[in-house]
Every structure is written in C-alpha cells, then in structure tokens.
Amino acid sequence: MDDFLLPLFPLETVLLPEAPLPLHIFEERYKLLIGECLKAKSTGGGQQEFGVLLAKDQEMRTVGCTARIINVTRKYADGRMDLFTVGSRRFEVLYTNEEEAYLRGSVEFFDDDVDADIPDEQEAQHAIELFRQALQRLHKSTDMPVHLPQPYRHLSFRIAAPLPLELEFKQQILPLRNETERLRRVTRVIAQLITQLNFVQKARSKAGGNGNLHPQG
C-alpha cells in the first residue's frame, strides 16, 4: 500500500474529530483495506488510518476525517469484522487513485488556523448547557451528566457528533478552521433542535402521550 495515498471509505455519514465510529466490515474491498491498516498498525509503519468521506446521492465529498482503529471488537468466520474507530485528522482530497480494489487519495491534512481563537469560558459553558438540554430531551431523562473538560479546542465537534443533526450541517462545519465560529454555528443549531424536540413532546402529550390522535365520538 502506497504510504503517500490514504485509503478512502465513502459512507453515508460525517465523521468528526474525536467522534466514535463503530463499523461492520463485510465487503471484500473493505476487508482488504482494513487488513492493510491493521497490518500497518501492528508494524508501526504505513497507513494506519483510513479516510471517511460523506457519500450521498451518488456524490462523494472531498473534505473528510480519518478514522483511527482502536480495536477489532469481533471477527467472523467469513472474514467480516466489527471495528471501533475514532475520528482523528481532517483532510481534503486532491485527487483519487483507483489502482487498488478500494479507493485511495492524495490528501492534504489540515487543522484550525494557528491564530484562530478558542471560545471563552462563558460561551463554552452555554454551549455545553444546551447540549445537556438536548440530551435530556432525546433520552427523556433529567439526569444527564455531561463531562467535557478543557481545552475547548474541538468542543464544537464533541457536542455535534452525538446529536441527530443534519449530515449537511456536520459536513459544513468540518472544513471550518476557527473553533469559535464552529461553536457558534453548532450552538444555534442545537437551540433549534431543542425547540423542535419541545414541540414534538407537547404534541405527543396532547395526543395522549403516544403520538396518536384519538378519534372522537
């Protein structure tokens, strides 16, 4: 496997840095891809990560995030496997290569701008509180402790990843190189999500608690 080309795994998902991504590998080309990454991991050389790119409606985006394999949680007799991976580095595809069974690409890795500011404590805590409120409504629980310690360099990604936000929105924040700007966008969208969840909850309560309207007469 060419160490200068990143193995690419198009999926209908957006992987964000530090976000967990469990995978079930069953296609032969991706068994080969993962096998190469695991081999590189065991030897300490080569491409140990693979790139996850949003693929939807027959279109593959060019900005994605690498997945780092934490462990293989299960192996099947037919070669299938379950993986636990975590988002690592953001990248942009410069060009793709189809010489192998799976897609590879020449990529440029990037991080936030060196002079980009990070959110202040008040702004970060406001975002974390909204995140907690969203989780409470989603899980229908008032006891929802949230532990997001500093630094808040990737706070936006950490609170956006577990929430049911639109894929397009997650894709839009992926290339942004300023955490304060990202967090403000994420905070606005979480506030909108809370409003929607409140509306659904009220509608279900009026319908008898199960979301169904009762016939009259």
Image: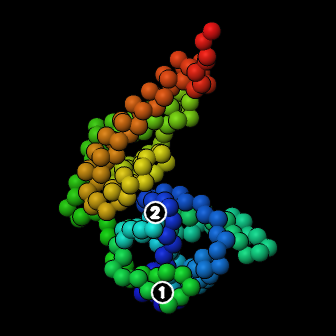
Could you tell me the amino acid type at mark 1?
A: Glu
Image coordinates of residue 31 in percent, x first then y, are: 64, 77
Q: Toward the viewer: 85 or 125?
A: 85
Image coordinates of residue 26 in percent, x first then y, are: 67, 71
- Mark 1 or mark 2, earlier in chain: 2
Answer yes or no: do the residues labelled 1 and 2 have beta carbons within 8 Å?
no
Left or right: 150 with respect to 204? left
Could you tell me the amino acid type at mark 2?
A: Lys
Q: Secondary structure at mark 2?
A: strand
Which residue is pictured at 64% across the width and 69% down the height?
25
Residue 88 shows up from this direction: no
Which residue is label 1 attached to?
98
Q: Toward the viewer: 4 or 172?
A: 172
Image coordinates of residue 64 in percent, x first then y, are: 40, 67
Give the CA distance from mark 1 to mark 2: 19 Å
Left or right: 71 with respect to 160? right
